[in-house]
Every structure is written in C-alpha cells, then in structure tokens.
Image (tube, rainbow, N blue to C red):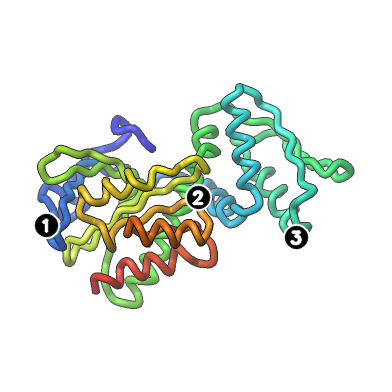
Amino acid sequence: MIKAAALKPVTTGDMNIVNNVLTNGRQNIKIEHSEEKNLVPHVVESLACQMVDLDDYIKDYLRELRSLYASKKDTFHLTMDHIPLEKKGEIIKLFENLQGVFSGVYYCENCDVLYGKLTYSPKAQKFIDGIYMEIACRKMVKDILCEFENKYSKRFNLYSNTIIKTGNGSIQQEFDLIIESPSDGHIYLIEIKSGNNFNEFDKFYNIGCKYHVIPKRLMMINNHLSNEQIESIEYFCEYYCVNLKNDSLRKKIFTMLENDL
C-alpha cells in the first residue's frame, strides 16, 4: 500500500463525486484522496504484466526473493529444472529485462540455475514484494473497462491507491483500485493480494459491509487462491474473488458491472 503522505487531495477536475457521500445503491462511501494517474513508466508496466503472465511459474521464485530481501542477502540462484522448456526462455528474458531490480543475471545451462543479484532500492524491493501485481492489475482492469465501455456505451473512472471513508468518517481504508460510474454514482472496490499468507477473509467481508458494497461491488484479487477456495469464499463471504487464471478477471469485472446495468 502507498502511505497517505504520498497521496494527493482529489480535485473537482479529477472526479465527479468526491465531497458527497454516495447513497445510490445504499453505498456508504466518501472518497478522500487518490494517487496520481500516471504512476509508472510504460516499460515498468509492461514488465509487471509479463510477471503476471508467468505467475504460475515464478510465484515460488518471488517468495524466495522476498525472503532474501528479509535476510539482507543480495545474491540469488534459482533452480529451473522444474520449469517447462517453452517457459524457461521467457523467464530468463524477463529477469534479464528487469534492469534496476536485478543485475548480473545469467543462466547456467549445465546446472539449470538462474543467477543474479538483487537491487536494494526501496522501489525495487516494493516491486518484488507485490507492487508489480498492483501495476499489472491496474493495466488489466483499465483495458477491461475500455472493452466494457465500448460494448455498453457507459463511461467509468478508475482510481489507484485511493483512501475512502464511511459517510460519518468513522472508518478509513485504502483500496488498490476503485471503479466509479459517474452516471449513477456506483463505486466498486478492488483489493489486490500478492502474498500467500493472507487469510483474513472475514475482515475483508466486514470492511465491505461497512461500506455497503456487499454483495456485488467488492472484489479481491489473490493469485494464490485455487478455484475451489475462490468458490468457497465467494459463497460464504459474498464478494468476488479472482486468481487471474483463465480470463477470470475479465469475466468477473464484466459480471460485477453488468449487475448494475
């Protein structure tokens, strides 16, 4: 998450409904701050999307890299003997292209190991810790909204790392992505979890209830959930869950927005 100090106040030019509590559809939301629209260079966005595309194959690598950051070690060696041949080249190229995050990347064909060094800059570490997932999902949701807008002639605004409050200001929360429908005032909240240790599904449900977005207008993206786990969470907690497999993000964004047509 981005700290509130890094956020800017929302201006009237940035969004149509800011200062008023949104009561349409029983929502209980007031937007307080939103991050700048142009967050990262295009090349960083492209690298983040490539990481998500290869998620099933690099997930364990990222977990190992995070543990190296935690233990203050900068050299990594990643065994690749379990990676399908057709994906191995893509992963090696991705790591080579992540310049500024990694350095000295090389692949030993004889030992089937990928070597390199971590950069200990705050941005590089945050990128590996999970910001890459937020960047990629933001791009994916933006593209999905464009498709939806073209199909239904309905416009949406997309905001990143946005602080919201309940109508009386008693609850304050930051969400990774917020979709706003200016024509009817509906707001859809999306949170992104890239770690494998998150299991506070009850707290996420309680937050959704406070903002009156349960059901239909709350979504969690978690790439570590299986399809079976998602089915169970959605049944009991009544918010959308997505693991980014099989075009699931596009399908559920469409379903969520179509509920209010």
Q: Amino acid at mark 2?
A: Glu
Q: Would you name the residue on which mark 1 appears?
A: 23
Of badges 1 and 2, the one in the foreground is: 1
Q: Residue at x 12, y 46 (%)?
A: 167
Q: Quadrant of residue 103?
A: top right
Q: Up-down: is 27 above or below 97?
A: below
- Amino acid carrying mark 3 in the image: Glu
* Mark 1 or mark 2: whose residue is earlier in sequence: 1
- Residue type for callout 1: Thr
- Front one among 207 and 52: 207
Secondary element at tag 2: helix
Quarter of the figure that contains the N terminus: top left
Label 2 belongs to which residue? 45
Q: Which residue is mark 3?
A: 86
Query: Callout 3: helix, strand or loop?
Result: helix
Mark nearer the viewer, 3 or 1: 1
- Sequence order check, earlier mark of 2 and 3: 2
Relative placement, left or right, of 225 versus 5 is: right
- Which residue appears at 35% of the width and 75% of the height? 150
The residue lying toward the viewer, choosing from 146 and 180, is 180
Left or right: 259 as drawn, with respect to 29: right
Is residue 147 depicted above or below 225 in this figure?
below
Neighbour tally class for label 1: few under 14, some 14-19, many 20 plus, Cα within 10 Å:
some
Quadrant position of the C terminus in the picture:
bottom left
Q: CA distance from mark 1 to mark 2?
A: 35 Å
The percent position of residue 73, horizontal first and vertical second, equals 65, 24
Badge 2, how many Cα within 10 Å: few under 14, some, many 20+?
A: many
Crowd class of label 3 (few under 14; some 14 to 19; many from 20; radius 10 Å): few
For marks 3 and 1 on the same chain, the one whose residue lies earlier in the sequence: 1
Q: Is residue 215 visible?
A: yes
Query: Which residue is the extreme one toward the top?
Result: 72
